Amino acid sequence: MKRILQLILVTLFLYSCKTIEAVQPEVSNQPIPVSEQNSSIITVPIEMNLKPYFDDVEKNTPKKFTGKEENCEGVSYNYIFLRSPINIAGKKDEFEFSINGKYGLSVVTALNVSPYLVMKTLV
């Protein structure tokens, strides 16, 4: 009886180790239908207090601009621009700024005439 039980167990063990053969799925090359999506718009209202930034711009921008270029020949100039406070305003989706000021310009022309030309003119 022991032998029969061993034989049954060995037989069951050998059959239980058998590999499973899976059936391959059918391949279809049909396109997958895609439903059309409606476009959407999201409006996100944003409010910011920009006054501290405007004040920082006013504080860090010089009130006086000067410059000059001096040449031995041609045109030499000096300029000065004195600005008034920067006017910055914003309303909803509009931004506006203006700068008023006074402008001064001094232009000097220097003609460098060769001595040969002067002598020829005097003769």
Image: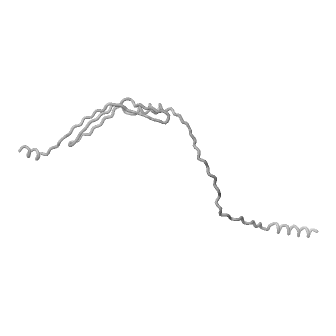
At 92% from the left and 68% from the top, the residue drawn is 2
How far across and how far down the image is residue 56, in percent?
A: 44, 32
Furthest-left residue in view?
A: 123
Give the answer, above or below, for where 16 lies relative to 64. Answer: below
| Colour pattern of the rendering | one colour
Position of 63 relative to 13 (above/below): above
- Residue 121 image offset from top left, x and y in percent: 8, 44
- Above or below, 32 against 83 in this view is below
Viewed as shown, does residue 109 lie left or right of 65? left
Which of the 4 image quarters holds residue 108? Answer: top left
The residue shown at (33%, 34%) is 65
Residue shown at 94% from the left, 68% from the top: 1
In the rendered image, residue 60, in percent from the top left (x then y), is placed at 41, 33
| Near-viewer residue (3 or 119) | 119
Taking the image as shown, residue 8 lies to the left or right of residue 67, namely right
Q: Horizontal placement of 6 versus 86: left or right?
A: right
Q: Which is nearer the eye, 8 or 62?
A: 62
Viewer-closest of 46 and 50:
46
